[in-house]
């Protein structure tokens, strides 16, 4: 698989970096033949997985990361690196499982990656590669003897790109929100409550972007001016959405215009004829949805002002009232993002 090949390439790259560091640690000046050679045994510190890698993670488990790490770095080189960067503080590496994302802290470096499949073996390999690169020779104190420059390799190792950190992932190009909605109309003559479903599309990766929505509401029976009516309403709106992105949630506000198709029919009069009309208004809404995952929950509140509510006309009574002046709604559902 491509992912396995990338991991093997990352392991070769880490081993090559650490091998080069091993070469630079050999003495630069050979011992003079007139001087005796004094050999000192290096201090040895035993390391195991529990003293180096820890953290509240079940996927990957710290011991699984340690097993992958020792396959990337020779044991003697790994022990030397750990002595150089630990400085008496253990554990050096901490793994935190956050569900889909997982966080790695190694030698003072912090990265967070995503794996929606929760492949623990894959996570352990990625974490081991990151730890190996975090303790490479570039992070060690520059107090090593110099050596002549090594000739460049015939084919430099290819280091694959690690999965992008969560914070570096771009916002989606568009969102499609689908949810259940409840609206209430308030007016001098007509007060009504309705339920239905709302579908809304928004686009743009900038702070401002277009949005369009349509709401299908179920018919409802109501009494206006002493006349029982069956009312039906189909609102459509369009406007701009302003976003404030965060690591876990994205807050947004919407401002636009709305138009609603109205249908009224008297139930108890001798002439029971349906009449339709158009209702124009201004719409304002605020909402929030989760930032992570292609399918995320959302919730929104909206308000709509109708400056000139249409008249309700029923024969033979004539004009019995007007439709509501204000509409207030609440919507909750799921948001599908398109990257």
Image (cartoon, rainbow, N blue to C red):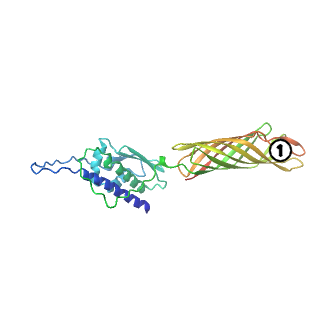
What residue do we see at 40% from left, 56% from top? 160
For the point 76% across and 39% down, the residue is 307
Asked if residue 78 shows in the view, the reply is yes
The location of residue 103, given as percent across then percent down, is 43, 47
Please give left or right for residue 204 compared with residue 112 in the image. right
Residue of label 1 = 228
| Camera-nearest residue between 159 and 123 | 159
Total numbered badges shown on the rendered structure: 1
Could you tell whether 330 is left or right of 108 in the image? right
Q: Position of residue 211 (x, y in %)?
A: 64, 48
Does residue 131 appear to the left or right of 298 in the view shown? left
Q: Residue furthest left?
A: 34
Camera sees residue 197: no
Query: At which x and y percent is residue 129?
Result: 37, 53
* Residue drawn where x is 48% and y is 46% of the image: 167
Figure quadrant of residue 85: top left
Question: Between residues 78 and 219, which one lies in front from this camera angle?
Answer: 78
Q: Estimate how packed mark 1 is, as few (under 14), some (14 to 19) or many (20 or more) residues with alpha carbons within 10 Å.
A: some
Task: State the SS at label 1.
Answer: strand
In the rendered image, residue 155, in percent from the top left (x then y), is placed at: 34, 61
Q: Residue furthest top?
A: 188
* Quarter of the image with the N terminus in it: bottom left
């Amino acid at each position: 698989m491509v992912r396995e090949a990338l991991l093997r390439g990352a392991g070769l790259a880490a081993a090559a970096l650490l091998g080069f560091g091993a070469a630079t640690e050999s003495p630069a000046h050979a011992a003079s033949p007139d001087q005796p050679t004094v050999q000192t045994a290096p201090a040895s510190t035993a390391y195991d997985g529990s003293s180096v890698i820890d953290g509240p993670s079940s996927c990957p488990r710290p011991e699984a990361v340690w097993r992958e790490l020792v396959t990337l770095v020779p044991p003697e080189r790994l022990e030397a690196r750990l002595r150089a960067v630990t400085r008496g503080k253990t554990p050096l590496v901490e793994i935190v499982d956050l569900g889909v994302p997982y966080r790695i802290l190694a030698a003072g470096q912090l990265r967070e990656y995503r794996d929606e499949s929760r492949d623990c073996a894959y996570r352990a390999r990625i974490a081991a590669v990151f730890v190996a690169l975090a303790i490479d020779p570039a992070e060690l104190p520059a107090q090593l003897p110099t050596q002549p420059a090594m000739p460049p390799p015939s084919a430099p190792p290819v280091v694959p790109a690690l999965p992008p950190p969560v914070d570096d992932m771009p916002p989606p190009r568009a969102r499609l929100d689908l949810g259940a909605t409840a609206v209430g109309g308030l007016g001098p003559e007509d007060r009504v409550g309705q339920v239905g479903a709302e579908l809304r599309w928004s686009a743009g990766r900038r702070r401002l972007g277009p949005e369009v929505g349509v709401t299908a509401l179920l018919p409802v029976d109501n009494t206006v001016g002493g006349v029982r009516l069956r009312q039906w309403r189909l609102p459509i709106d369009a406007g701009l959405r302003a976003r404030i992105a965060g690591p876990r949630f994205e807050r947004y506000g919407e401002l636009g215009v709305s138009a609603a198709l109205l249908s009224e029919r008297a139930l108890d009069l001798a002439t029971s004829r349906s009449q339709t009309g158009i209702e124009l208004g201004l719409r304002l809404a605020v909402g929030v949805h989760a930032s992570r995952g292609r399918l995320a929950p959302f919730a929104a509140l909206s308000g709509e002002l109708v400056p000139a509510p249409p008249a309700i006309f029923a024969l033979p009574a004539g004009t019995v009232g007007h439709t509501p002046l204000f509409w207030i709604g609440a919507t909750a559902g799921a948001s599908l993002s398109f990257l």
